[in-house]
Image (cartoon, rainbow, N blue to C red):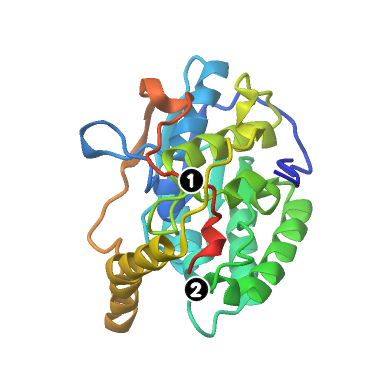
Amino acid sequence: MAGSNRTGSIRPEPRAWSRYVALGDSMTEGLGDPGPEGGLIGWADRLAALLSAHSPDFAYANLAIRGRRMGDIAGRQIDVGLELQPDLVSIIGGGNDILRPGADPDALAAQLEEAIARIRATGADVLMATPTDPAGAPVVERTRPKVAVYLAHLWSIAERQGAYLMNQWALTFLQDWRMWEPDRIHMSAEGHRRVALAAYETLGHTAAEADWRIPLPPQPRPGRLESLRENAVWAREYAAPWVGRRLRGTSSGDHIDPKRPDLTPLQPPESATTPAEHPHTGDASPHDQP
């Protein structure tokens, strides 16, 4: 697969962090990466497992909740997260805002930078991430101009605030639809695993598992009838409920609590850093379908 898989960090300085707090929405909560007993793993849990090897007293909290918008991430989540006195905070958000009509990427960026400045003022390090490139997605690609403006702000914020920035826009393996769940919004377990390794290298460490940069083997693209059938299922099972929640003013994260509200020692599942099995076939990009 052509393109770059560089993580994009502007300041890769590895450290032995011992108090990691993850903030964000469904991506950081781990949707698409099921764990034992109905729980979720996700890239942040996987990253925590990698970081824990560098600190004997490592502890980790994850306050991310699906559906959360920037106002909550940069507001309540920051308030709660800073009470935990972290030395590393990952904060990724804005996607749920940009999907809505009238979203202002300049205002979102200003909100995010204020939050990051609060974190940096405590002495903690910050890990950010750019959005993935939505080019080619018949529905989501309409947000590409706003996503591009937001992305440009993120590079500037990272430079001004001295933050680490994972460049997901450049992670070309995410253009493979097998890195995504059938809802075409959330990463699969393999997508989460690879992004965790990219984040680990963004923080300046060298991942032992170098396979995350290697594209999956090509497989036949689905035929036209199969694609139409899959699109119809997607519209009924995923798009329609999402639109319904927007019209009702509700969120998939309503009445959901953070999965790891406190800083606790990490006991990662065996699958935290190993390749994930995934049932999808075909090599179509998630951007080939709405």
Q: Is residue 186 left or right of residue 211?
A: left
Q: Is residue 231 visible?
A: yes
| SS category of the residue bearing label 1 | helix
Question: Where the N terminus falls, by quadrant?
Answer: top right
Above or below for 107 versus 163: below
Residues at discs 1 and 2 in contact (Cβ within 8 Å): no
Crowding at label 2, few (<14), some or many (≥20) Cα neighbours within 10 Å? some
Residue 194: which disc?
Answer: none
Pick the front one: 50 or 173: 173
Q: Residue 45, image x and y in percent? A: 44, 34
Above or below for 50 versus 121: above
For marks 1 and 2 on the same chain, the one whose residue lies earlier in the sequence: 2
Q: Residue at x 43, y 27 (%)?
A: 272
Q: Residue 158, image x and y in percent? A: 73, 52
Q: Nearer the viewer, mark 1 or mark 2?
A: 1
Q: Residue 144, image x and y in percent? A: 64, 71
Crowding at label 1, few (<14), some or many (≥20) Cα neighbours within 10 Å? many
Q: Is residue 88 left or right of residue 238?
A: right
Give the total number of marks visible in the rendering.
2
CA–CA distance in space, label 1 to label 2: 22 Å
Q: Residue 254, image x and y in percent? A: 26, 64
| SS category of the residue bearing label 2 | loop
Q: Amino acid at mark 2?
A: Leu
Pick the front one: 275 or 65: 275
Using the rendered view, name the quadrant where residue 51 is placed: top right
Give the residue at mark 1. Answer: 178
Q: Residue at x 37, y 39 (%)?
A: 279
Using the rendered view, name the quadrant where residue 118 is placed: bottom right
Q: Amino acid at mark 1?
A: Arg
Give the residue at mark 2. Answer: 99
Q: Is residue 82 visible?
A: no
